[in-house]
Image (cartoon, grey):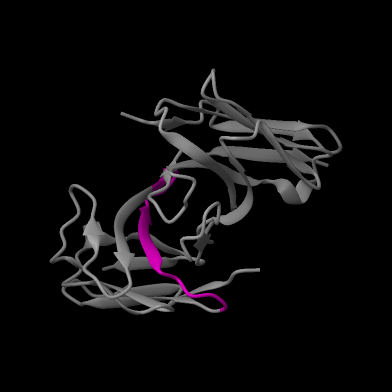
């Protein structure tokens, strides 16, 4: 049973436009959510996170939105840049603590076209 | 920012060889380290959780005698793939956290293991 799902395996966006990556979860115990970016043959790089007590967290071009009632979160990147092209994973954990196990989604490959 | 170093980045060896992978947190104390495995075009699958000074907790289906984990200090965890076979070929990634509230896991760059 996949507790964290990223239903879009890939997304193509024009440079300068907004990229919206979506993630759904089923476990209502999750209370800490993270987005990671991954290039081939490299480890994931932490981008941004959000606690369940918030519905939005912003860091530069990256904003994460959390809709607890819908068990849905999204990552907005604006403006998108070609260097943003990578695989993006959402992840979730329990007890606001990434020291607990992270459950990852399947990833979405973002391609930003110049 | 937090840095996790993983070594080696790529290993090619013969079937039956044991391979050790090191994961180090360079600028923070990692009370917990995690070991993941990633198959091509798939997500990261957690193999085990390693807490400093105690035995690792393995996920279901992961053989603890096959994948030996040691977390002897707050900055180093090792994964040893014992008597590796071609089916063990994969991308292995570690992560580390200091267990603070709302502190993310930071990942190493991974180790590509190829068993001939």
**Residue extending furthest toward the left:** B65
Q: Position of residue A7 (x, y in %)?
A: 51, 25
Quarter that holds the C terminus of chain A:
top right
Tell me the residue at 57%/78% (across/down): B27
Task: Say if residue A106 shows up in the picture.
Answer: no
Residue B33 is situated, as x and y percent measured from the top left of the image, at 39, 65
Name the side, left or right, on which B36 lies relative to A72: left
Extreme-right residue of the structure: A16
Q: Which residue is situated farthest in the top direction here? A: A70
Where is residue B49? Give x, y as percent.
Answer: 31, 59
Question: Looking at the image, how many numbered discs can be counted on the residues?
Answer: 0
Does B52 sit left or right of A30 as displayed? left
Q: Nearer the viewer, residue A59 or A85?
A: A59
Is residue B44 rendered to the left or right of residue B13? right
The residue sitting at 42% across, 27% down in the picture is A28
- State which quadrant residue A58 falls in: top right
Q: Which residues are magenta?
A: B27-44
Front-most of B33 and A23? B33
> Which quarter of the figure is the N terminus of chain A placed in?
top left
Residue at (27% x, 67% y) in the render: B115
Q: Is residue B12 magenta?
A: no
Residue A6 visible, this orientation: yes
Residue B21 % position (x, y): 35, 75
Measured along the vertical axis of the image, is residue B107 above or below residue A18? below
Residue B40 included in the magenta stretch of the image: yes
Residue at point 35%, 67% (across, down): B113
């Amino acid at each position: 049973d996949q507790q964290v799902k990223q239903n879009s395996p890939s997304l193509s966006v024009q440079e300068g436009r907004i990229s919206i990556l979506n993630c759904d979860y089923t476990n209502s115990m999750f209370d800490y959510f993270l987005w990671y970016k991954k290039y081939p043959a490299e480890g994931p790089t932490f981008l941004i996170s959000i606690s369940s007590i918030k519905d939005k967290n912003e860091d530069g071009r990256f904003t994460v939105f959390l809709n607890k009632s819908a068990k849905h979160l999204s990552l907005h990147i604006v403006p998108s840049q070609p260097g943003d092209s990578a695989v993006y994973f959402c992840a979730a954990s329990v007890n606001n603590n990434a020291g607990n196990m992270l459950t990852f989604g399947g990833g979405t490959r973002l391609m930003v076209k110049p | 920012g937090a840095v996790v170093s993983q070594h080696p980045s790529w290993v090619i060896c013969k079937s039956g060889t044991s391979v050790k992978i090191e994961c180090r947190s360079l600028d923070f104390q990692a009370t917990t380290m995690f070991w993941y495995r990633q198959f091509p075009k798939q997500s990261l699958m957690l193999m085990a959780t390693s807490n400093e000074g105690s035995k690792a907790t393995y996920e279901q289906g992961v053989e603890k005698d096959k994948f030996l984990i040691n977390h002897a200090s707050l900055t180093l965890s090792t994964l040893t793939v014992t008597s590796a076979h071609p089916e063990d070929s994969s991308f292995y990634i570690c992560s580390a956290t200091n267990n603070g509230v709302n502190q993310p896991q930071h990942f190493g760059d991974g180790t590509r293991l190829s068993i001939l």
